Image (cartoon, rainbow, N blue to C red):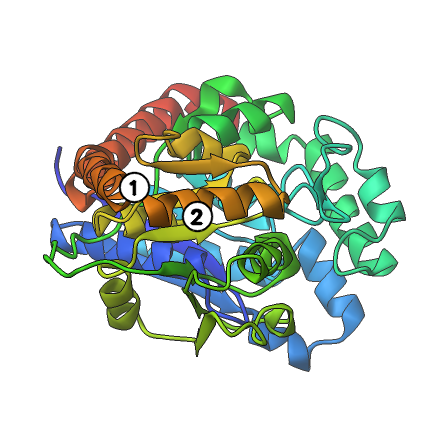
Amino acid sequence: MEALRILFVHNAYQQRGGEDSVVDDEIQLLRDHGYEVELYRRENHDIESMGKLAVARDTLWSARTMRDVEAVLSRFRPDVVHSHNTFPLISPSLYWAAARRHVPVVQTLHNFRLLCPQAMLLREGKVCEDCVGKVPWRGAARGCYRGSLPQSAALASMLMLHRGMGTYTSKVTCYIALNDFCRDVFVRGGLPAGRLRVKPNFVADPGLDSTARAGFLYVGRLSAEKGIATLAAALATLPDVQCEVIGTGPEEGAIDSLANVKMAGWQQGPYIVERMKSSLALVMPSLWYENFPRTLVEAFACGLPVIASRLGAMAALIRDGETGLLFNPGDASDLAEKLAWARAHPDAIRGMGEAARKEYESKYTPRRNLEILRAIYRDAMAEATADEPDNA
């Protein structure tokens, strides 16, 4: 397949996260293999200088996106537009700009925003699917997005406007779900099954070291949906079990007082890799489904098994007893039991780490990801060509 021109589109977050890293990594992967890639990017920092009405308007339909993207399409002439995040400033008007030029759109689904105003299918610390496949009025009425009724209503309005316009079913050529579990959720939510492909995230191979392993590791934002309170409660019953916590966030106070916890704060990638290569297991106590935790792939690449909630993507990606251990979501006693077992059985945990590394080598390398991405682009271009008379 000849090298293509790909226009990436991404609305960056105020606090850099996994989605931003995925965008950077995919762009670099494509460029390294001869693809010509350009990035149209908007920053959520711009919201600070905009009025509330302007932000709400752009969330529904961004005239600036239409102008900017049509200019880029005319100049760059991409074969495919690959969108990651359009919320809130880029907006779904992106898809219409691409359709006017008959350019296929591939949309990666990093969260559940198209089904849920809050994007995580989480309410009061528990999974909530009340808006899946339905009019999201509950999410608006409950103020599910940041506890704000106006902002939640704006998001629900965006979803309903573009569902009614057929944006999500006719203007997006292909969606990328990050795993089979998430694909099934999106199908139940109303996205066309025939337009959904599965492509996981990937990370560069960090290599393996023969470092001795001890203690547990948590990497990520310290927020309620990540299950920090569950982790803290479990560790409080295991004073001899050590855990290093890498990250910052509003739930820091729930765990930083424990004597057996080392708070490392925010750290750069090399430090995280080093700790992954020297820990017994990564702990992921999330209360929400997750879509595809990047830290999980990083752990597998380092030969590090994962102890995670038996929930959503985590349960789909981790083979219990083979590449890690699963515990009941929010159950601190069950998590404590798994941590104690892992500490008492280092040989078994080492074997799980070796299996996790093999999982990485077969599914999550850059080379394997490029193969899948090429196939998705090829299918999207073929689909757009077949549908071109309908888009005119």
Question: Which residue is rendered at x = 51% and y = 74% of the image?
Answer: 259
- How far apart are the alpha carbons under marks 1 and 2? 53 Å
Question: Which residue is rendered at x = 53% and y = 23% of the image?
Answer: 184
Q: Can residue 93 be seen in this view?
A: yes
User: Which residue appears farthest toward the bottom when viewing the image?
Assistant: 49
125 to 170, vertically: above or below: below
Disc 2 crowd, CA 10 A, few/some/many (<14, 14-19, 20+): some
Question: Which residue is rendered at x = 67% and y = 81% of the image?
Answer: 49
321 to 247, vertically: above or below: above
Could you tell me residue 375's position as x and y percent? 25, 29
Q: Name the residue tied to disc 1.
A: 79
Please, what is the three-letter code of the amino acid marked with disc 1?
Asp
Q: Name the residue tied to disc 2.
A: 340
Q: Can residue 291 be seen in this view?
A: no
135 to 271, vertically: above or below: above
Disc 1 crowd, CA 10 A, few/some/many (<14, 14-19, 20+): many
Please, what is the three-letter code of the amino acid marked with disc 2?
Ala
In the rendered structure, which disc, 1 or 2, sits on the residue that comes first in sequence? 1
Are dots 1 and 2 in contact, CB under 8 Å?
Answer: no
* Along the viewing direction, whichever of 308 and 138 lies nearer the viewer: 308
Query: Which element type, helix, strand or loop, lies under badge 1?
Result: loop
Query: Which element type, helix, strand or loop, lies under badge 2?
Result: helix
Question: Which residue is rendered at x = 18% and y = 36% of the image?
Answer: 358
Could you tell me residue 379's position as x and y percent? 31, 25
109 lies left or right of 46: left
Which image quadrant is residue 369 in?
A: top left
Could you tell me residue 251's position as x and y percent? 63, 68
Quarter holding the N terminus?
top left
249 lies left or right of 279: right
Could you tell me residue 119's position as x and y percent? 64, 47
